[in-house]
Image: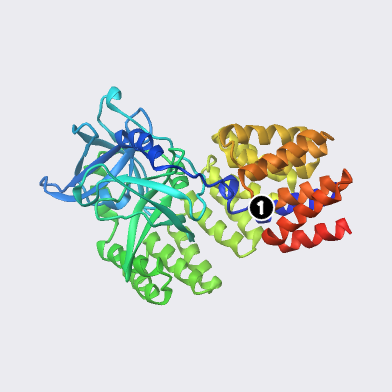
Amino acid sequence: MKFKNTILLAGFVILAVAGCGKYAAETEVSTGYMIPLVKKIQPAVVTLVAYDADRNVTNQGSGFFVDKKGHLITNYHVLDGAYAADVKTYDGVKHPIELVVAENKLSDLIKVRVKIPEAAIHWVSVSETEPSIGERVMVVGSPMGLEQTVSEGIVSAVRELPVVGKVFQLSAPISPGSSGSPVVNMSGNVIGVISFQAVKGQNLNFAVSGKGILDLKQNETLKTLSEWTYDINKRTPRLAEELCKKGFNFSIRGEFKDALNYYKEATEKSPDDTLAWYGLGSCYDGLDKPEDAIVAYQQAVRIDPENADAHYNLGRYYRKLGRYEDAIETYHQAIEVDPDHAASYFDLGMLYGKLEEFENGEQSFKQVLRINPDHAPTHHYMGLIYNGMGRYDDAAESCKKALKINPNSAPTLYNLGIAYGGLGKSRQEMEAFKQAIRVDPDFAPAHYNMGIIYLINSDKAAALEEYKILKVLDQNMAEVLFERIY
């Protein structure tokens, strides 16, 4: 059906940033339900204490286990400068941090391995699903040293920070010591990690997304905490780092002119500090100076050409500016450095889909699934690719795989409906669209296609009801459907 395919191809524009999770249904949860949820999460959360070389306490934060191997996630800044650290588990027992496994200073995340018996480990699942604004969340941590404190709130905003990625602003109360705490949705999955506050008139609390955890790449050489800190201190000028921290505090509030001065000074003091160049690029981005931003990001690549993430971040910015050919070339450079750089393959697939180069998109997404077979957004977009190619059987299969991982994705249910329509399976098509609406009553494309189906079945009254709904949700779709009706 012509109009269905029009909406389908637009999906790469509409859904490009959000992936499968943007339209996730909000869940109304009673206070009583919070009790078993808290009981499930608390045993996985630890209080973390960091020490200097003389075993003096230098920092305190929170963290949480993500598997039975003793891998723990916390904030980079919690362990920055530490020569040793202990975690105190829910049962009050202390265990030492053994090795640094992976880290990303830009997203303020670090994964460590704790020396702890497997039988003593409780862990939580991490999801890359992006929460909806207004979605209810829970935070468990150790603010001000008060262990296993539970706070509740909503997601106030979702922001995209250059290089850092998605950041969630939360209404849940946060205090010093909360850094590294998991942000948990009402399904019991970790969707973010508490990272920082921007205090100016009111407390603004932020968490980096769960996707950042899943994107952490294991270090080639695992080091003890003291070895890791010693190595960093040899190559990282502390003055530049302090300037970057001050710049970041301004940029997170959108005060890019003030932040710019700090990042400029940082690049002058330490011209080989990639963090400083990333911050400078972020400021130019916020000030709508794209050419200056590109120069700054290119400097980060120049300093560290064997860093796939540096190429990837430059590619993301090219994509944002609509410089798709430059973006594609840069993503390929990232893959040349790291043939398993899933994020670059994924973005390539998205770009090829947008450009309707479906075969290239298919190959890119296949590489993501080679690296991570359970990546729901990739299965989702493979469905879009196959629908665009007219391979409806393959599209339906990809959508089903995505739904097996994330059953409450309205966009995926919608794309499954498109596939069924292409196969001439009218009953399954309609049921998929209805299920998408049940998951998210405000998902406009499903209402539009339901209106078309009603028209085909000569049910003009039902089509008009869908038109009335679309008038509130999407005026353009409403007008198109109205023209079809009359």
Where in the figure is residue 24, as x and y percent of width and height? 56, 46
Where in the figure is residue 298, as x and y percent of width and height? 50, 63
Where in the figure is residue 4, as x and y percent of width and height? 80, 48
- Residue placed under numbered mark 1 in the picture: 351
User: In the displayed image of the protein, which residue is found farthest to the front?
Assistant: 461
Instruction: Tell me the SS state at disc 1.
Output: helix
Residue nearest the viewer, comparing 473 with 414: 473
| Residue 69 vertical placement versus 38 (above, below) | above
Where in the figure is residue 411, as x and y percent of width and height? 65, 45
Q: Amino acid at mark 1?
A: Leu
Residue nearest the viewer, comparing 424 with 237: 424
Give the colour scheme shown: rainbow
Relative side of 253 to 16, left or right: left
Quarter of the image for residue 300 reads bottom left
Relative side of 437 to 462, left or right: left
Residue nearest the viewer, comparing 66 with 230: 66
Q: The C terminus is located in which quarter? A: bottom right
Rendered residue at 25%/46% (across/down): 142
Q: Is residue 164 visible?
A: no
Q: Is residue 166 visible?
A: yes
- How many neighbours does mark 1 have within 10 angstroms: few (below 14), some (14-19), or many (20 or more)? many
Quarter of the image for residue 410 reads top right
Rendered residue at 38%/57% (across/down): 171
| Residue 71 vertical placement versus 455 (above, below) | above
Rendered residue at 14%/49% (across/down): 57
| Residue 239 vertical placement versus 22 (above, below) | below
Query: How many discs mark residues in the rendered view?
Result: 1
